[in-house]
Image: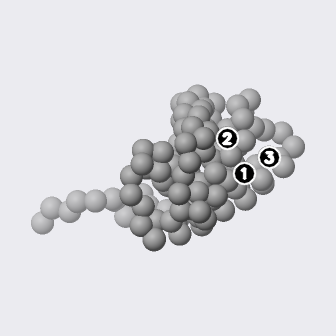
Amino acid sequence: MDRYGIDLMKTREMDLNDILHNRLKLLLIMAKNLIGGRAVGDYQWQAIEQNANHMAMECDSFIDYPASPAPDFDELCQHLKSLAMNLKSVAEKRRIGRDRKEIMLKDFNRITELLKINSLKRYFMS
């Protein structure tokens, strides 16, 4: 019988970096959906708010590091925190204004641009 899927010998337990990576991807997907005007249900609003809270807290802990691991790391954290706080505010009000949408789009575009930089890929895009 053919077996498909992941080789069990190559699997490992998730660590905090894996969780952060998945939260980052989820935050970016949620932001893109909201910016694009797609419908969001109750469960998604709760997920947006919880994920935004976690990412904002993570960004605070990154900003407290004495030495940044990459030159653009501080800028990335600032844009992530801005996007997370805007998403949290939008989730609480359940609506998005034009000005906030523009700010979120700028943050989203800068984050995705920064993640393409080689020095940051190893921290977030494993």
Which corner quadrant of the image does residue 112 belong to?
A: top right
User: Can you say which quadrant of the picture contains the N terminus?
Assistant: bottom left
Closer to the camera in the image, 10 or 77: 77
Q: Is residue 49 above or below residue 66?
A: below
* Residue most extreme to the left: 1
The residue sitting at 63% across, 59% down in the picture is 88
Which badge, 3 or 2, is on the more N-terminal residue? 3
Whether residue 120 is visible to the viewer of this picture, yes or no, is: yes
Q: Relative to 55, is 96 on the left or the right? A: left
Q: Is residue 59 above or below residue 103?
A: below
What residue is pinned by disc 3? 63
Image coordinates for residue 50, horizontal then vertical, percent: 60, 66
Image coordinates for residue 16, horizontal then vertical, percent: 62, 60
Task: Give the CA distance from mark 3 to mark 1.
Answer: 6 Å
The residue sitting at 46% across, 65% down in the picture is 44
- Residues at circles 3 and 1 in contact by the CB criterion of under 8 Å: yes
Image coordinates for residue 94, horizontal then vertical, percent: 53, 62
Looking at the picture, the colour scheme in use is one colour
Image coordinates for residue 125, horizontal then vertical, percent: 53, 42
Whether residue 69 is visible to the viewer of this picture, yes or no, is: no
Circle 1 Cα neighbour tier, 10 Å, few/some/many (<14 / 14–19 / ≥20): many
What residue is pinned by disc 2? 79
Task: Give the CA distance from mark 1 to mark 2.
Answer: 9 Å
Which badge, 1 or 2, is on the more N-terminal residue? 1
Callout 3, which amino acid? Answer: Ile
What residue is pinned by disc 1? 59
Callout 1, which amino acid? Answer: Cys
Q: Is residue 5 above or below residue 71?
A: below
Give the label, 1 or 2, closer to the camera.
Answer: 2
Circle 3 Cα neighbour tier, 10 Å, few/some/many (<14 / 14–19 / ≥20): some
Task: Give the CA distance from mark 3 to mark 2.
Answer: 12 Å
- Residues at circles 3 and 2 in contact by the CB criterion of under 8 Å: no
